[in-house]
Each structure stands twice: as structure tokens, then as C-alpha cells.
Amino acid sequence: MATASRYRRARRPLAGRRVLVTGAASGIGEIMAREAARRGASHVVIWDRDEHGAERVARTITARGHRACAWEVDLTDAEAVERAGRAVTEAIGGIDVLINCAGVVTGKAVLDVGEDDLERVYGVNVFALYRTARAFLPGMLERDDGLIVTIASAAGLVGVARQTDYSASKFAAVGFSEALRAELRHAGSAVTTLTVMPYYIDTGMFAGVRTRFPRLLPVLEPADVARRVLDQIEAGAATVALPRFARAVQLVKVVTPVHDILTDIFGINATMDHFTGRVRRADADTTTPGV
Ligand SMILES: NC(=O)c1ccc[n+]([C@@H]2O[C@H](COP(=O)([O-])OP(=O)(O)OC[C@H]3O[C@@H](n4cnc5c(N)ncnc54)[C@H](O)[C@@H]3O)[C@@H](O)[C@H]2O)c1
């Protein structure tokens, strides 16, 4: 029998919580890790395949008197995730808020997407969600407390040209987060999920993209996105689309020709025409814009 409390938002302050952020060596993951510490998280764990970047972020957090640690973890390696999950649980007892933020994009047209691209994109953007859940959900279920955040994308709501791999992986990420929320609710668990669907963010991941109507659909500021995600975590939200206008796409989807016409008018399929993606800097000791 459903009770109203199952559907009520429960506030979830980050203070005193153990927070793990994947992909936190740069971009919004880095800012969320730093901001979670500032909001009083008892421990911030940074996972990234970029060891130096992860250590740099952990150092900036510990230098301000908070507890943080960095782990080099390649999320495409299921055994490495399992090992790191065990080690984190042994070290600090578990994770209360898991933020799946790591992501990759190729920006390739469909016929240029190779098997190795698919393995990497699905490995990081989709399969890693199951791997991190296997590592930390059992502890959350035991404590009947916890939150799994999935940083998906507005490209998980609408298919975008030159993103057949990325969009499809983000649709999967949105589906994973929603289905997991349903599964946990059905089981009567207090553990839940938050699905985050942002439009383009100025981190470098999508360097070169252009937006036709920046007032309605601006390229978002990384610090602003990070702050709003943490606000929504603390407010107990289940989904967040940024900017809010991005959510409107779900309404127009009901009529396919309207959806196609509007996404073309808004220039969504031209956004990737000048995509270059991040050019990796040899010197990883740099700071994400907006931090
Ligand atoms: N930048 C955007 O425009 C945008 C828009 C919507 C959603 N997103 C999503 O937001 C998230 C963060 O994006 P960002 O813009 O901060 O990107 P970013 O490239 O700055 O950060 C991604 C991080 O993931 C890490 N990573 C990549 N592959 C990994 C692997 N195999 N194992 C471990 N770590 C790995 C990278 O080293 C990097 O530190 C991603 O999931 C992305 O898809 C980004």
C-alpha cells in the first residue's frame, strides 16, 4: 500500500555525509567535490582515471581543513572499480552520496563511431553506473540511507546530431537512474536517486559547440551547474534539468514532427558542427574554469 511519505521529498544536507564523486579531476565533478567539502561533507572521495588531477583536487580540499582522498580508478575496468570500492569501504565505512559524474564524448558522425569508441563511451557513461552501484549500494541498503546521483545530460532527453553514441548512452543513464529509483521505492527503501540533465556546460568537454539562442539555451557556467546540483541533492529532488527550459523538450516530444521542427529551429542539431572537444593539456596542474 503506497503511503504519501514514499513520494515526499526528504531534505538531505551534505553536512556529515561521505561523498564520492567520479570524474572529479576536472569539470563540474571537481567543483562539486570542492563544494561538497565546503558544505560540510565529512569525507570527499575523488575517483578519476587522471591520477594527478584527482590528487590535485584532493590537496586543494585538504588544504582548507576538510577530509578528502584521491583514487586513480578507470571506470571502464570493472575489476578496478570493485577493488577501489572495497578499499573505500574499508577506509571510511561506506559512501552516503555517490555522484556518478565521469563522462566521455566522441562527437563523431554515426559511421565514424568505432567499436573502441562504443566501448569507452558506454563503459564510462553507462556500465560504470552499475559498477559503482555494486560497490556502494549494498552499504546504503543496509543503513537504509543513501543517494545515487547520475549526471546524465539534456542529450539524454533529446537525440542530437553527431551524438548517436553519446545521446544513446545518456538516454541509458536517464533510464538507469529512473529505473533504480523505481526499484528502490518498490522495495520500500529510503535510498533513492537524482537524475541530472544539463545542457552544454563550459568545461571544455564540448569545446567548440555553439548555441543558437543563448538567452533560452545558454552554455552553462560550470560553477553554477555544480552549485545547483548540490542544492538539488540537499533539497531531496529526484530530477533536475538545466536550464529549466530544457525540460520543455519532454512536452514537445509527444508530437514527433513538432519535436523535429522545434529542435531544428533551436539549432540543436547544428550545435556540434564546430565541436572540437577538449584538447588535453600536458600540464594537468590547471584549474577548471569557474572554480
Ligand atoms: N560539458 C558539458 O557540456 C556537459 C553537458 C551535459 C552533461 N555533461 C556531463 O557532465 C559530466 C561531467 O562533464 P564535464 O563537462 O565536467 O567533463 P570533464 O571532461 O571536465 O570531466 C570528466 C571527467 O571524467 C573523467 N573520466 C573520463 N573517463 C574516465 C574513466 N574511464 N575512468 C575514470 N574517470 C574518467 C575525466 O578524466 C574527467 O576528469 C559528464 O558525465 C558529462 O557527460 C557535460
Image: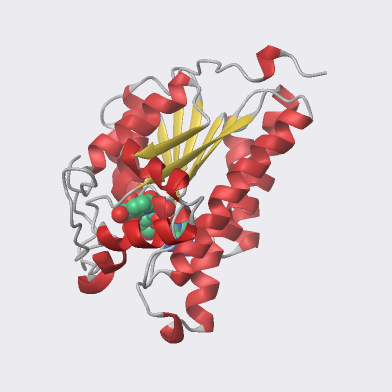
In the displayed structure, 176 sits above or below 105; it is above
The colouring scheme, among rainbow, by chain, secondary structure or one colour, is secondary structure
Tell me where residue 12 appears, x and y as whole percent. 50, 18
Residue drawn 35% across the image and 21% down it:
39
Residue drawn 24% across the image and 73% down it:
273
Question: Which image quadrant: the C terminus?
Answer: top left
Residue 38 visible in this rendered orientation of the protein:
yes
Q: Is residue 145 left or right of residue 17?
A: right
Q: Is residue 43 left or right of residue 88?
A: left
Residue in the foreground of this view, choosing between 130 and 232: 232
Tell me where residue 135 appears, x and y as whole percent. 66, 45
Residue in the foreground of this view, choosing between 159 and 135: 159
> Which residue reaches farthest bottom?
111
Residue drawn 21% across the image and 54% down it:
285
Residue in the foreground of this view, choosing between 80 and 202: 202
Residue 51 visible in this rendered orientation of the protein:
no
Residue drawn 43% across the image and 24% down it:
41
In the displayed structure, 136 sits above or below 262; it is above
Q: Is residue 179 left or right of residue 75?
A: right
Tell me where residue 147 appears, x and y as whole percent. 57, 31
Q: Total marks drawn?
A: 0
Taking the image as four quarters, which one is ligand 1 found in?
bottom left
Quarter of image, res 1: top right
In the displayed structure, 135 sits above or below 229; it is below
Tell me where residue 9 appears, x and y as whole percent. 55, 18
Quarter of image, res 183: top right
